[in-house]
Amino acid sequence: MRMGYDLYDLTIQKYSRRALPAPFKLNLPAQTIWGAPYQGNALYVKDAVRYALEGCDLNLSPVKILKLCAIYELHLLPDCAAELITNFRDRISHLVDVECVLDLLTPRLNGKQLSYRDYLKAFCEDVTQFYPK
């Protein structure tokens, strides 16, 4: 975190050796399901919420907050997007319907689409609903 960035995502592409070729992950000769890591990507982002909680506000504009939310969502980090939205609600509420944005970020639970508030309520009432089936 030397420059103020935190690791948010890491992907690794594996490629097997000729001595024992592995099945491909795609329908073309590319990365395989096992093998040594050959290529990867890392996503580093400044944690605006942590900075704010530590008293070091990054002074992000409402548009930049929403752009950061979109970056989180695009990288399958809806929890980080929701945290950002809830912590900076006052800065963005004149641009977007915050409850609607939170509802859009909320995944289905047991095949049912819930609102953000109902989703959190379900978690608090019965965490076993979130266990793998």
Image (spheres, rainbow, N blue to C red):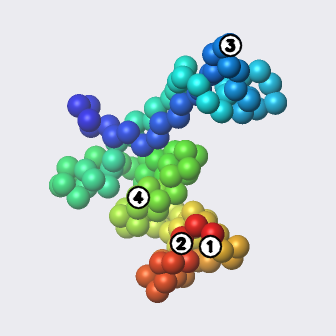
Circle 1 — which element?
loop
Whole-angstrom CA distance, mark 3 to mark 4, is: 46 Å
In the foreground, 127 or 95: 127
**Residue at the disc numbered 3:** 18
Mark 2 or mark 4: which is in front?
2
Q: Do the residues under discs 2 and 1 have CB atoms within 8 angstroms? A: yes
Q: Residues within 10 Å of mark 1 (few under 14, many from 20)?
A: few
Q: CA distance from mark 1 to mark 4?
A: 22 Å
Front: mark 3 or 4: 3
Q: Nearer the viewer, mark 1 or mark 4?
A: 1
Amino acid on which the number 1 mark rests in the picture? Leu
Viewer-proximal residue among 63 and 31? 31
Which residue bears the numbered disc 4?
84
Please say if 70 is above or below 96. above
Judging by the rendered image, the residue that carries numbered circle 1 is 109
Q: Which numbered marker is on residue 130?
A: 2
In whole angstroms, how far apart are the C-alphas of marks 2 and 3?
41 Å
In the rendered image, the vertical position of residue 39 relative to residue 119, given as above or below: above
Q: Are marks 2 and 3 in contact (CB under 8 Å)?
A: no
In the rendered view, would you say 52 is above or below 19?
below
